[in-house]
Amino acid sequence: MPEPPVPPPAPPADPGAAPEPVLVLGAGPVGQTAALLLARWGVPVTVVDARPERAAAGSKAIVQQRDVLDVWATLGADAVAEEGLTWDTARTFYRDRELFSVRLRDRGASPLPPFVNLSQSRTERILDERMAAAGLAVRWNHEVTAIDQDASGVRVRCAAPSGDVELRGSYALACLGPHGRVAREAVGADFGGASFDDRFLICDIRADLPGWERERRFYFDPRWNPGRQILIHPCPDSVFRIDWQVPPDFDLEREEAQGGLDRRIRQIIGDRPYEIVWHSVYRFHTRVADPMGAGRVLLAGDCAHLVAPFGARGLNSGVHDAENAAWKLAFALKGWADPRLVETYAAERLAAARDNAEITGATMRFLVPRTPREHAHRLSVLESAAADPRAASRVDSGRLFEAFYYTESALTTPCASRPFPGRPPRGEPPVPCPGVLVPDVPLSLAGRPEITRLRTLAREGVTVLASSARGARAARAAAQRATPAPVSALVLAEADPTGALAAALDARSGEVWLLRPDAHIAAVCDEDDTAAVTAAVETCLGGAAPVPGRVRQPGEEQDGGVLPASG
Protein backbone atom coordinates (compact mmCIF):
# COMPACT_ATOMS: atom_id res chain seq x y z
CA MET A 1 0.00 0.00 0.00
CA PRO A 2 1.24 3.54 -0.65
CA GLU A 3 2.58 5.47 2.29
CA PRO A 4 0.23 8.14 3.67
CA PRO A 5 0.96 11.66 2.46
CA VAL A 6 3.21 13.79 4.64
CA PRO A 7 1.48 16.96 5.88
CA PRO A 8 2.91 20.19 4.52
CA PRO A 9 5.53 21.80 6.76
CA ALA A 10 4.29 24.59 9.01
CA PRO A 11 6.03 27.30 11.04
CA PRO A 12 5.45 27.09 14.81
CA ALA A 13 1.86 27.83 15.79
CA ASP A 14 1.20 31.19 17.36
CA PRO A 15 -1.28 31.45 20.26
CA GLY A 16 -2.48 34.80 18.90
CA ALA A 17 -3.93 33.29 15.71
CA ALA A 18 -7.30 34.73 14.74
CA PRO A 19 -10.20 32.55 15.98
CA GLU A 20 -12.31 33.34 12.91
CA PRO A 21 -11.21 31.65 9.70
CA VAL A 22 -10.26 33.23 6.45
CA LEU A 23 -13.01 32.31 4.00
CA VAL A 24 -11.56 31.02 0.73
CA LEU A 25 -14.32 31.19 -1.87
CA GLY A 26 -13.66 28.74 -4.68
CA ALA A 27 -11.70 25.48 -4.69
CA GLY A 28 -9.88 25.68 -8.00
CA PRO A 29 -6.06 25.66 -8.00
CA VAL A 30 -5.84 29.27 -6.81
CA GLY A 31 -8.23 28.72 -3.92
CA GLN A 32 -6.55 25.43 -3.04
CA THR A 33 -3.14 27.10 -2.99
CA ALA A 34 -4.40 29.96 -0.83
CA ALA A 35 -6.00 27.57 1.66
CA LEU A 36 -2.84 25.47 1.93
CA LEU A 37 -0.60 28.50 2.38
CA LEU A 38 -2.84 29.98 5.06
CA ALA A 39 -2.96 26.66 6.90
CA ARG A 40 0.82 26.46 6.68
CA TRP A 41 0.99 29.80 8.49
CA GLY A 42 -1.34 28.41 11.16
CA VAL A 43 -4.34 30.49 10.06
CA PRO A 44 -7.77 28.76 10.24
CA VAL A 45 -9.46 28.42 6.86
CA THR A 46 -12.91 27.60 5.52
CA VAL A 47 -13.16 26.68 1.82
CA VAL A 48 -16.44 26.68 -0.13
CA ASP A 49 -17.28 25.88 -3.74
CA ALA A 50 -20.53 26.03 -5.71
CA ARG A 51 -19.90 22.78 -7.58
CA PRO A 52 -21.23 19.49 -6.19
CA GLU A 53 -17.81 17.86 -6.47
CA ARG A 54 -14.47 18.00 -8.21
CA ALA A 55 -14.90 17.62 -11.97
CA ALA A 56 -12.13 16.22 -14.18
CA ALA A 57 -12.69 17.52 -17.69
CA GLY A 58 -10.01 18.37 -20.21
CA SER A 59 -6.56 19.85 -19.95
CA LYS A 60 -7.61 23.49 -19.29
CA ALA A 61 -4.69 25.34 -17.66
CA ILE A 62 -1.81 22.97 -18.37
CA VAL A 63 1.39 25.05 -18.26
CA GLN A 64 2.95 25.42 -14.80
CA GLN A 65 6.04 27.61 -14.46
CA ARG A 66 9.04 27.00 -12.19
CA ASP A 67 8.21 29.77 -9.70
CA VAL A 68 4.71 28.31 -9.28
CA LEU A 69 6.00 24.75 -8.99
CA ASP A 70 8.22 26.19 -6.27
CA VAL A 71 5.21 27.43 -4.27
CA TRP A 72 3.52 24.04 -4.58
CA ALA A 73 6.71 22.19 -3.63
CA THR A 74 6.83 24.23 -0.41
CA LEU A 75 3.37 22.81 0.34
CA GLY A 76 4.45 19.24 -0.32
CA ALA A 77 2.84 19.13 -3.78
CA ASP A 78 6.07 18.10 -5.52
CA ALA A 79 4.03 15.66 -7.59
CA VAL A 80 2.95 18.43 -9.95
CA ALA A 81 6.55 18.87 -11.09
CA GLU A 82 7.29 15.15 -10.93
CA GLU A 83 4.26 14.05 -12.97
CA GLY A 84 4.22 17.00 -15.36
CA LEU A 85 5.91 16.74 -18.72
CA THR A 86 9.03 18.91 -18.63
CA TRP A 87 9.88 21.23 -21.49
CA ASP A 88 12.50 23.93 -21.79
CA THR A 89 12.29 25.06 -25.42
CA ALA A 90 9.66 27.20 -27.14
CA ARG A 91 9.79 27.13 -30.96
CA THR A 92 8.04 29.62 -33.22
CA PHE A 93 7.38 28.99 -36.93
CA TYR A 94 6.08 31.06 -39.84
CA ARG A 95 4.41 28.66 -42.27
CA ASP A 96 7.01 25.88 -42.55
CA ARG A 97 10.04 27.95 -41.48
CA GLU A 98 11.31 28.12 -37.90
CA LEU A 99 11.85 31.76 -36.94
CA PHE A 100 13.43 31.29 -33.52
CA SER A 101 13.50 29.13 -30.41
CA VAL A 102 13.78 30.21 -26.80
CA ARG A 103 15.53 28.10 -24.16
CA LEU A 104 14.59 29.02 -20.62
CA ARG A 105 17.46 29.84 -18.25
CA ASP A 106 17.65 29.82 -14.47
CA ARG A 107 19.93 32.32 -12.76
CA GLY A 108 20.08 30.14 -9.65
CA ALA A 109 20.26 26.37 -9.28
CA SER A 110 16.66 25.32 -8.78
CA PRO A 111 15.96 21.57 -8.87
CA LEU A 112 12.64 22.38 -10.54
CA PRO A 113 12.13 22.44 -14.32
CA PRO A 114 11.40 25.74 -16.12
CA PHE A 115 7.95 24.54 -17.19
CA VAL A 116 5.88 21.40 -16.96
CA ASN A 117 2.62 20.54 -18.69
CA LEU A 118 0.01 18.78 -16.59
CA SER A 119 -3.75 18.87 -16.87
CA GLN A 120 -5.51 21.22 -14.48
CA SER A 121 -7.68 18.36 -13.24
CA ARG A 122 -4.61 16.33 -12.17
CA THR A 123 -3.07 19.39 -10.52
CA GLU A 124 -6.30 19.89 -8.57
CA ARG A 125 -6.29 16.26 -7.39
CA ILE A 126 -2.72 16.60 -6.17
CA LEU A 127 -3.61 19.76 -4.26
CA ASP A 128 -6.69 18.01 -2.85
CA GLU A 129 -4.37 15.36 -1.41
CA ARG A 130 -2.31 18.06 0.26
CA MET A 131 -5.46 19.69 1.63
CA ALA A 132 -6.58 16.38 3.13
CA ALA A 133 -3.16 15.94 4.71
CA ALA A 134 -3.47 19.42 6.22
CA GLY A 135 -6.95 18.72 7.58
CA LEU A 136 -8.70 21.02 5.10
CA ALA A 137 -12.03 20.06 3.57
CA VAL A 138 -14.07 21.79 0.88
CA ARG A 139 -17.73 22.59 1.55
CA TRP A 140 -19.12 21.63 -1.85
CA ASN A 141 -22.56 22.76 -3.06
CA HIS A 142 -22.10 26.17 -1.41
CA GLU A 143 -22.84 28.86 -3.98
CA VAL A 144 -21.81 32.32 -2.77
CA THR A 145 -24.78 34.66 -3.10
CA ALA A 146 -23.75 37.67 -1.00
CA ILE A 147 -20.68 39.10 0.72
CA ASP A 148 -20.85 41.76 3.43
CA GLN A 149 -18.16 43.15 5.66
CA ASP A 150 -17.67 45.38 8.67
CA ALA A 151 -14.68 46.59 10.63
CA SER A 152 -14.17 43.24 12.37
CA GLY A 153 -14.86 40.67 9.66
CA VAL A 154 -16.90 39.37 6.73
CA ARG A 155 -20.19 37.54 6.32
CA VAL A 156 -20.66 35.30 3.30
CA ARG A 157 -24.08 33.90 2.46
CA CYS A 158 -24.22 30.67 0.46
CA ALA A 159 -27.04 28.73 -1.14
CA ALA A 160 -26.68 25.06 -0.16
CA PRO A 161 -28.94 22.02 -0.70
CA SER A 162 -30.08 22.20 2.93
CA GLY A 163 -30.88 25.91 2.67
CA ASP A 164 -29.07 29.20 3.01
CA VAL A 165 -25.86 29.19 5.05
CA GLU A 166 -24.11 32.21 6.53
CA LEU A 167 -20.38 32.01 7.22
CA ARG A 168 -18.40 34.46 9.33
CA GLY A 169 -14.71 35.03 8.81
CA SER A 170 -11.88 37.46 9.42
CA TYR A 171 -11.32 38.02 5.67
CA ALA A 172 -12.63 36.59 2.41
CA LEU A 173 -10.39 35.66 -0.50
CA ALA A 174 -12.57 35.27 -3.59
CA CYS A 175 -11.23 32.72 -6.09
CA LEU A 176 -14.58 32.32 -7.83
CA GLY A 177 -13.36 32.37 -11.41
CA PRO A 178 -14.57 34.63 -14.21
CA HIS A 179 -18.19 34.41 -13.07
CA GLY A 180 -17.45 35.74 -9.57
CA ARG A 181 -19.51 38.89 -10.06
CA VAL A 182 -20.82 38.75 -6.48
CA ALA A 183 -17.27 39.19 -5.17
CA ARG A 184 -16.38 41.94 -7.63
CA GLU A 185 -19.54 43.82 -6.66
CA ALA A 186 -18.62 43.43 -2.98
CA VAL A 187 -15.44 45.45 -3.55
CA GLY A 188 -16.92 47.80 -6.14
CA ALA A 189 -14.63 46.51 -8.87
CA ASP A 190 -14.90 47.36 -12.53
CA PHE A 191 -14.07 44.38 -14.77
CA GLY A 192 -13.30 46.28 -17.92
CA GLY A 193 -11.29 45.06 -20.84
CA ALA A 194 -11.68 43.57 -24.28
CA SER A 195 -12.92 40.39 -25.94
CA PHE A 196 -11.57 38.93 -29.19
CA ASP A 197 -13.88 37.98 -32.05
CA ASP A 198 -11.87 35.01 -33.26
CA ARG A 199 -12.37 31.84 -31.29
CA PHE A 200 -9.96 29.05 -30.41
CA LEU A 201 -10.61 25.35 -30.84
CA ILE A 202 -8.78 23.39 -28.15
CA CYS A 203 -8.35 19.65 -28.62
CA ASP A 204 -6.45 17.09 -26.52
CA ILE A 205 -5.35 14.10 -28.59
CA ARG A 206 -3.37 11.01 -27.68
CA ALA A 207 -0.83 10.16 -30.37
CA ASP A 208 2.79 9.22 -30.94
CA LEU A 209 4.62 12.30 -32.32
CA PRO A 210 8.36 11.62 -32.13
CA GLY A 211 10.49 14.70 -31.53
CA TRP A 212 7.63 16.84 -30.28
CA GLU A 213 7.51 15.48 -26.73
CA ARG A 214 9.63 18.20 -25.09
CA GLU A 215 8.78 21.35 -27.03
CA ARG A 216 6.12 24.03 -27.21
CA ARG A 217 5.47 24.73 -30.90
CA PHE A 218 3.76 27.85 -32.22
CA TYR A 219 2.87 28.22 -35.91
CA PHE A 220 1.92 31.43 -37.70
CA ASP A 221 -0.11 30.90 -40.87
CA PRO A 222 0.68 27.17 -41.31
CA ARG A 223 -0.73 25.30 -44.27
CA TRP A 224 -2.93 23.44 -41.72
CA ASN A 225 -4.62 26.70 -40.69
CA PRO A 226 -3.95 29.37 -43.34
CA GLY A 227 -4.18 32.96 -42.17
CA ARG A 228 -4.40 31.96 -38.53
CA GLN A 229 -2.35 30.27 -35.80
CA ILE A 230 -1.79 26.90 -34.16
CA LEU A 231 -0.20 26.18 -30.79
CA ILE A 232 0.87 22.65 -29.80
CA HIS A 233 1.82 21.58 -26.27
CA PRO A 234 2.98 18.09 -25.22
CA CYS A 235 1.39 16.59 -22.10
CA PRO A 236 1.97 13.38 -20.11
CA ASP A 237 0.83 9.98 -21.42
CA SER A 238 1.42 10.90 -25.09
CA VAL A 239 -1.31 13.55 -25.03
CA PHE A 240 -0.88 16.68 -27.13
CA ARG A 241 -2.91 19.85 -26.64
CA ILE A 242 -3.60 21.62 -29.95
CA ASP A 243 -5.09 25.13 -30.11
CA TRP A 244 -6.41 26.30 -33.49
CA GLN A 245 -7.42 29.90 -34.04
CA VAL A 246 -10.79 29.66 -35.83
CA PRO A 247 -13.29 32.19 -37.25
CA PRO A 248 -15.97 33.79 -35.06
CA ASP A 249 -18.72 31.62 -36.63
CA PHE A 250 -16.91 28.32 -36.05
CA ASP A 251 -19.31 25.48 -35.13
CA LEU A 252 -17.63 22.52 -33.43
CA GLU A 253 -20.59 20.14 -33.78
CA ARG A 254 -20.84 20.83 -37.50
CA GLU A 255 -17.07 20.49 -37.85
CA GLU A 256 -17.15 17.04 -36.27
CA ALA A 257 -20.22 15.88 -38.18
CA GLN A 258 -18.67 16.83 -41.52
CA GLY A 259 -15.28 15.29 -40.73
CA GLY A 260 -13.56 18.65 -40.48
CA LEU A 261 -12.04 18.00 -37.06
CA ASP A 262 -10.44 14.77 -38.23
CA ARG A 263 -9.05 16.59 -41.29
CA ARG A 264 -7.60 19.31 -39.04
CA ILE A 265 -5.85 16.76 -36.88
CA ARG A 266 -4.64 14.70 -39.87
CA GLN A 267 -3.10 17.81 -41.45
CA ILE A 268 -0.82 18.04 -38.42
CA ILE A 269 -0.07 14.41 -37.50
CA GLY A 270 -0.54 12.63 -40.83
CA ASP A 271 -1.77 9.05 -40.90
CA ARG A 272 -0.74 8.20 -37.35
CA PRO A 273 -3.47 6.74 -35.16
CA TYR A 274 -4.88 9.12 -32.55
CA GLU A 275 -7.56 9.37 -29.90
CA ILE A 276 -9.50 12.52 -28.99
CA VAL A 277 -9.37 12.94 -25.21
CA TRP A 278 -11.25 16.24 -24.91
CA HIS A 279 -12.15 19.27 -26.95
CA SER A 280 -13.84 22.64 -26.55
CA VAL A 281 -14.11 26.09 -28.11
CA TYR A 282 -13.25 29.34 -26.32
CA ARG A 283 -13.31 33.06 -26.82
CA PHE A 284 -10.51 34.85 -25.03
CA HIS A 285 -10.79 38.02 -23.03
CA THR A 286 -8.47 40.54 -21.45
CA ARG A 287 -10.08 41.91 -18.29
CA VAL A 288 -8.75 43.25 -14.98
CA ALA A 289 -10.78 43.91 -11.83
CA ASP A 290 -10.04 47.30 -10.32
CA PRO A 291 -9.73 47.35 -7.37
CA MET A 292 -8.62 43.80 -6.59
CA GLY A 293 -9.73 44.18 -3.01
CA ALA A 294 -11.38 46.49 -0.53
CA GLY A 295 -11.37 46.19 3.23
CA ARG A 296 -11.58 42.52 4.17
CA VAL A 297 -12.48 41.14 0.74
CA LEU A 298 -9.74 40.28 -1.78
CA LEU A 299 -10.06 38.99 -5.36
CA ALA A 300 -7.67 36.43 -6.84
CA GLY A 301 -7.18 34.39 -9.99
CA ASP A 302 -9.72 34.54 -12.80
CA CYS A 303 -12.11 36.36 -10.49
CA ALA A 304 -9.66 39.28 -10.69
CA HIS A 305 -8.12 38.99 -14.15
CA LEU A 306 -8.65 37.22 -17.45
CA VAL A 307 -5.95 36.95 -20.10
CA ALA A 308 -5.44 34.92 -23.24
CA PRO A 309 -3.44 31.72 -22.62
CA PHE A 310 -0.56 32.59 -24.95
CA GLY A 311 2.21 32.95 -22.37
CA ALA A 312 0.60 30.87 -19.61
CA ARG A 313 -0.13 33.93 -17.47
CA GLY A 314 -3.54 32.93 -16.11
CA LEU A 315 -3.22 30.17 -13.51
CA ASN A 316 0.44 30.93 -12.85
CA SER A 317 -0.37 34.53 -11.97
CA GLY A 318 -3.33 33.36 -9.87
CA VAL A 319 -1.06 31.18 -7.72
CA HIS A 320 1.12 34.22 -7.04
CA ASP A 321 -2.05 36.13 -6.12
CA ALA A 322 -2.71 33.40 -3.55
CA GLU A 323 0.78 33.57 -2.08
CA ASN A 324 0.78 37.36 -1.90
CA ALA A 325 -2.57 37.33 -0.10
CA ALA A 326 -1.73 34.43 2.23
CA TRP A 327 1.44 35.78 3.80
CA LYS A 328 -0.02 39.25 4.25
CA LEU A 329 -3.20 37.91 5.86
CA ALA A 330 -1.13 35.68 8.14
CA PHE A 331 1.19 38.48 9.23
CA ALA A 332 -1.72 40.85 9.90
CA LEU A 333 -3.77 38.26 11.81
CA LYS A 334 -0.84 37.13 13.93
CA GLY A 335 0.15 40.68 14.85
CA TRP A 336 3.45 40.38 13.03
CA ALA A 337 2.65 43.39 10.84
CA ASP A 338 0.29 46.32 10.80
CA PRO A 339 -3.15 45.31 9.40
CA ARG A 340 -2.57 47.91 6.68
CA LEU A 341 -0.25 45.36 5.09
CA VAL A 342 -3.31 43.54 3.70
CA GLU A 343 -4.26 46.67 1.74
CA THR A 344 -1.05 46.35 -0.27
CA TYR A 345 -2.30 43.08 -1.79
CA ALA A 346 -4.67 44.93 -4.10
CA ALA A 347 -1.99 47.40 -5.18
CA GLU A 348 0.75 44.83 -5.86
CA ARG A 349 -1.41 42.27 -7.61
CA LEU A 350 -3.32 44.88 -9.62
CA ALA A 351 0.04 46.03 -10.98
CA ALA A 352 0.85 42.40 -11.83
CA ALA A 353 -2.53 41.88 -13.49
CA ARG A 354 -2.18 45.01 -15.59
CA ASP A 355 1.30 43.94 -16.65
CA ASN A 356 -0.04 40.55 -17.74
CA ALA A 357 -2.94 42.21 -19.54
CA GLU A 358 -0.59 44.53 -21.40
CA ILE A 359 1.69 41.67 -22.45
CA THR A 360 -1.05 39.26 -23.51
CA GLY A 361 -3.06 42.07 -25.11
CA ALA A 362 -0.10 42.90 -27.33
CA THR A 363 0.23 39.21 -28.20
CA MET A 364 -3.44 38.96 -29.15
CA ARG A 365 -3.26 42.09 -31.28
CA PHE A 366 -0.40 40.45 -33.16
CA LEU A 367 -2.22 37.10 -33.42
CA VAL A 368 -5.63 38.54 -34.25
CA PRO A 369 -5.06 41.84 -36.06
CA ARG A 370 -8.26 43.89 -36.31
CA THR A 371 -7.42 46.54 -38.87
CA PRO A 372 -5.72 46.54 -42.29
CA ARG A 373 -2.81 48.40 -40.72
CA GLU A 374 -2.37 45.73 -38.01
CA HIS A 375 -2.59 42.97 -40.65
CA ALA A 376 0.07 44.70 -42.75
CA HIS A 377 2.31 45.17 -39.72
CA ARG A 378 2.12 41.50 -38.77
CA LEU A 379 2.84 40.33 -42.31
CA SER A 380 5.80 42.69 -42.55
CA VAL A 381 7.24 41.48 -39.22
CA LEU A 382 6.84 37.80 -40.11
CA GLU A 383 8.32 38.19 -43.60
CA SER A 384 11.24 40.18 -42.18
CA ALA A 385 11.92 37.55 -39.51
CA ALA A 386 11.80 34.77 -42.11
CA ALA A 387 14.42 36.59 -44.16
CA ASP A 388 16.58 37.91 -41.30
CA PRO A 389 16.85 36.15 -37.90
CA ARG A 390 17.80 39.48 -36.31
CA ALA A 391 14.20 40.62 -36.81
CA ALA A 392 12.78 37.71 -34.81
CA SER A 393 12.58 39.77 -31.59
CA ARG A 394 9.63 41.65 -33.11
CA VAL A 395 7.56 38.47 -33.53
CA ASP A 396 5.07 38.06 -30.67
CA SER A 397 4.00 34.46 -30.12
CA GLY A 398 3.44 35.02 -26.41
CA ARG A 399 5.96 36.02 -23.76
CA LEU A 400 6.03 33.17 -21.26
CA PHE A 401 5.03 33.77 -17.64
CA GLU A 402 7.54 35.26 -15.22
CA ALA A 403 7.08 36.30 -11.61
CA PHE A 404 6.07 39.95 -11.37
CA TYR A 405 8.74 42.48 -10.43
CA TYR A 406 7.60 44.54 -7.41
CA THR A 407 10.17 47.19 -8.19
CA GLU A 408 7.62 50.02 -7.91
CA SER A 409 5.82 48.62 -4.86
CA ALA A 410 5.48 50.67 -1.69
CA LEU A 411 6.89 47.60 0.13
CA THR A 412 10.18 47.70 -1.80
CA THR A 413 13.15 49.79 -0.68
CA PRO A 414 15.11 50.90 -3.76
CA CYS A 415 18.88 50.49 -3.82
CA ALA A 416 20.95 52.96 -5.84
CA SER A 417 23.67 50.37 -6.42
CA ARG A 418 21.13 47.72 -7.47
CA PRO A 419 18.73 49.45 -9.87
CA PHE A 420 16.18 47.48 -11.86
CA PRO A 421 17.56 47.30 -15.42
CA GLY A 422 14.18 46.53 -16.97
CA ARG A 423 12.48 43.47 -18.35
CA PRO A 424 15.04 40.94 -19.63
CA PRO A 425 14.97 39.38 -23.12
CA ARG A 426 12.75 36.35 -23.74
CA GLY A 427 13.87 33.31 -21.81
CA GLU A 428 16.31 35.26 -19.63
CA PRO A 429 15.87 35.62 -15.84
CA PRO A 430 15.80 39.11 -14.31
CA VAL A 431 18.83 40.65 -12.64
CA PRO A 432 18.44 40.28 -8.84
CA CYS A 433 17.55 43.59 -7.20
CA PRO A 434 14.87 44.93 -4.84
CA GLY A 435 11.43 43.84 -6.05
CA VAL A 436 12.60 40.73 -7.94
CA LEU A 437 12.04 37.12 -6.84
CA VAL A 438 15.30 35.82 -5.39
CA PRO A 439 17.07 33.09 -7.39
CA ASP A 440 16.69 29.71 -5.73
CA VAL A 441 19.70 27.61 -4.70
CA PRO A 442 20.32 24.53 -2.54
CA LEU A 443 21.01 25.15 1.14
CA SER A 444 22.51 22.95 3.82
CA LEU A 445 21.67 23.97 7.40
CA ALA A 446 22.70 22.13 10.57
CA GLY A 447 19.66 20.90 12.46
CA ARG A 448 17.29 21.78 9.59
CA PRO A 449 17.42 18.82 7.21
CA GLU A 450 13.96 19.71 5.89
CA ILE A 451 15.33 22.97 4.48
CA THR A 452 17.06 22.13 1.21
CA ARG A 453 16.40 25.33 -0.78
CA LEU A 454 16.65 29.05 -0.11
CA ARG A 455 13.04 29.83 -1.00
CA THR A 456 11.75 27.19 1.41
CA LEU A 457 13.54 29.00 4.23
CA ALA A 458 12.39 32.41 3.00
CA ARG A 459 8.76 31.28 3.27
CA GLU A 460 9.11 30.87 7.04
CA GLY A 461 9.17 34.62 7.68
CA VAL A 462 11.66 37.42 7.08
CA THR A 463 15.11 36.38 5.88
CA VAL A 464 18.40 38.26 5.82
CA LEU A 465 21.46 37.18 3.84
CA ALA A 466 24.87 38.60 4.71
CA SER A 467 28.46 38.09 3.68
CA SER A 468 29.73 37.87 7.28
CA ALA A 469 28.53 36.42 10.58
CA ARG A 470 28.79 39.87 12.18
CA GLY A 471 26.61 41.33 9.46
CA ALA A 472 24.08 38.52 9.75
CA ARG A 473 23.77 38.94 13.54
CA ALA A 474 23.41 42.70 13.29
CA ALA A 475 20.87 42.49 10.49
CA ARG A 476 18.83 39.89 12.34
CA ALA A 477 18.68 42.04 15.47
CA ALA A 478 17.75 45.04 13.35
CA ALA A 479 14.94 43.08 11.67
CA GLN A 480 13.60 41.90 15.02
CA ARG A 481 13.27 45.49 16.14
CA ALA A 482 10.68 45.89 13.38
CA THR A 483 8.58 42.73 13.81
CA PRO A 484 7.96 39.78 16.13
CA ALA A 485 7.68 37.55 13.06
CA PRO A 486 10.17 34.72 12.54
CA VAL A 487 13.48 36.11 11.26
CA SER A 488 16.20 33.92 9.77
CA ALA A 489 19.75 35.06 9.06
CA LEU A 490 22.25 33.34 6.80
CA VAL A 491 25.93 33.84 6.13
CA LEU A 492 26.22 33.26 2.38
CA ALA A 493 29.46 31.28 2.36
CA GLU A 494 28.40 29.02 5.24
CA ALA A 495 24.89 28.20 4.05
CA ASP A 496 26.05 27.76 0.46
CA PRO A 497 29.73 26.79 0.35
CA THR A 498 29.50 26.17 -3.41
CA GLY A 499 29.04 29.91 -3.93
CA ALA A 500 25.97 29.41 -6.14
CA LEU A 501 23.88 31.93 -4.20
CA ALA A 502 26.60 34.57 -4.02
CA ALA A 503 27.15 34.17 -7.75
CA ALA A 504 23.42 34.33 -8.54
CA LEU A 505 23.10 37.55 -6.54
CA ASP A 506 26.47 38.93 -7.65
CA ALA A 507 26.83 39.53 -3.91
CA ARG A 508 29.30 42.10 -2.67
CA SER A 509 31.12 42.33 0.62
CA GLY A 510 29.23 44.31 3.24
CA GLU A 511 25.79 43.83 1.69
CA VAL A 512 22.71 42.55 3.48
CA TRP A 513 19.88 41.17 1.33
CA LEU A 514 16.41 41.26 2.86
CA LEU A 515 13.78 38.77 1.62
CA ARG A 516 10.02 38.99 2.04
CA PRO A 517 8.01 35.92 3.09
CA ASP A 518 7.18 35.29 -0.58
CA ALA A 519 10.92 35.19 -1.40
CA HIS A 520 10.94 38.52 -3.24
CA ILE A 521 13.91 40.76 -2.51
CA ALA A 522 12.68 43.65 -0.34
CA ALA A 523 15.93 45.58 0.04
CA VAL A 524 19.72 45.50 -0.24
CA CYS A 525 21.38 47.41 2.61
CA ASP A 526 24.81 48.14 4.02
CA GLU A 527 25.48 45.73 6.89
CA ASP A 528 26.76 48.63 9.00
CA ASP A 529 23.53 50.58 8.60
CA THR A 530 21.27 48.63 10.94
CA ALA A 531 18.76 51.48 11.05
CA ALA A 532 18.29 51.06 7.30
CA VAL A 533 17.67 47.32 7.80
CA THR A 534 15.02 48.02 10.44
CA ALA A 535 13.38 50.61 8.21
CA ALA A 536 13.41 48.24 5.23
CA VAL A 537 11.70 45.50 7.26
CA GLU A 538 9.07 47.97 8.43
CA THR A 539 8.58 49.05 4.83
CA CYS A 540 8.20 45.53 3.45
CA LEU A 541 5.64 44.73 6.15
CA GLY A 542 3.52 47.77 5.41
CA GLY A 543 4.58 49.85 8.40
CA ALA A 544 5.91 49.33 11.91
CA ALA A 545 4.24 46.66 14.05
CA PRO A 546 4.39 46.40 17.84
CA VAL A 547 7.00 43.96 19.12
CA PRO A 548 5.62 42.58 22.41
CA GLY A 549 8.00 39.65 22.38
CA ARG A 550 10.15 37.60 20.11
CA VAL A 551 9.69 34.08 18.79
CA ARG A 552 12.91 32.14 19.32
CA GLN A 553 14.21 30.86 16.00
CA PRO A 554 15.90 27.57 15.11
CA GLY A 555 19.61 27.84 15.81
CA GLU A 556 19.30 31.05 17.85
CA GLU A 557 20.59 29.53 21.08
CA GLN A 558 23.46 27.93 19.16
CA ASP A 559 24.88 30.90 17.35
CA GLY A 560 23.44 34.18 18.49
CA GLY A 561 20.56 34.05 16.02
CA VAL A 562 22.40 33.05 12.85
CA LEU A 563 21.22 29.79 11.31
CA PRO A 564 24.30 27.54 11.08
CA ALA A 565 25.26 25.62 8.00
CA SER A 566 25.66 21.86 8.20
CA GLY A 567 28.79 19.95 7.51
Image (spheres, grey):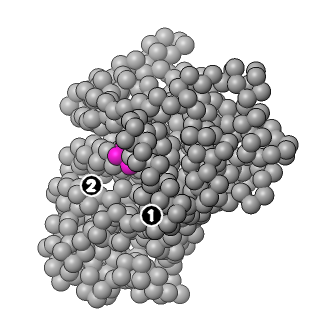
The percent coordinates of residue 399 (x first, y second) are 45, 54
Closer-to-camera residue (189/286):
286
The span picked out in magenta is 356-360
User: In the picture provided, is 126 more to the left or to the right than 160?
Assistant: right
Residue 271 is labelled as none
Q: Which residue is mark 2?
A: 336
Disc 1: CA contacts within 10 A as few (<14), some (14-19) or many (>=20): some
Q: Amino acid at mark 1?
A: Ala
Q: Earlier in the sequence, mark 1 or mark 2?
A: 2
The percent coordinates of residue 386 (x first, y second) are 54, 60
Q: Which residue is mark 1?
A: 391
In the image, residue 162 sits, relative to residue 90, either above or below, namely above
Residue at image location 61% in from the left, 40% down from the top: 226
Residue at image location 27% in from the left, 35% down from the top: 290
Figure label count:
2
User: In the picture provided, is 364 more to the left or to the right than 218?
Assistant: left
Q: Secondary structure at mark 2?
A: loop
Residue at image location 20% in from the left, 65% down from the top: 413
Report if residue 285 is visible in the image: yes
The label nearer to you, 1 versus 2, is 1
Q: Is residue 453 magenta?
A: no
Q: Is residue 357 magenta?
A: yes
Q: Secondary structure at mark 1?
A: helix
Hey, which residue is sitting farthest top in the picture? 163
In the image, residue 171 sits, relative to residue 427, either above or below, namely above
The percent coordinates of residue 427 (x first, y second) are 48, 65
Name the image quarter holding residue 183: top left
Closer-to-camera residue (518/500):
500
The percent coordinates of residue 340 (x first, y second) are 20, 46
In three-dimensional space, the C-alpha distance between marks 1 and 2, rounded to whole angstroms, equals 51 Å
Disc 2: CA contacts within 10 A as few (<14), some (14-19) or many (>=20): many
Name the main secondary structure of what is drawn in magenta.
helix
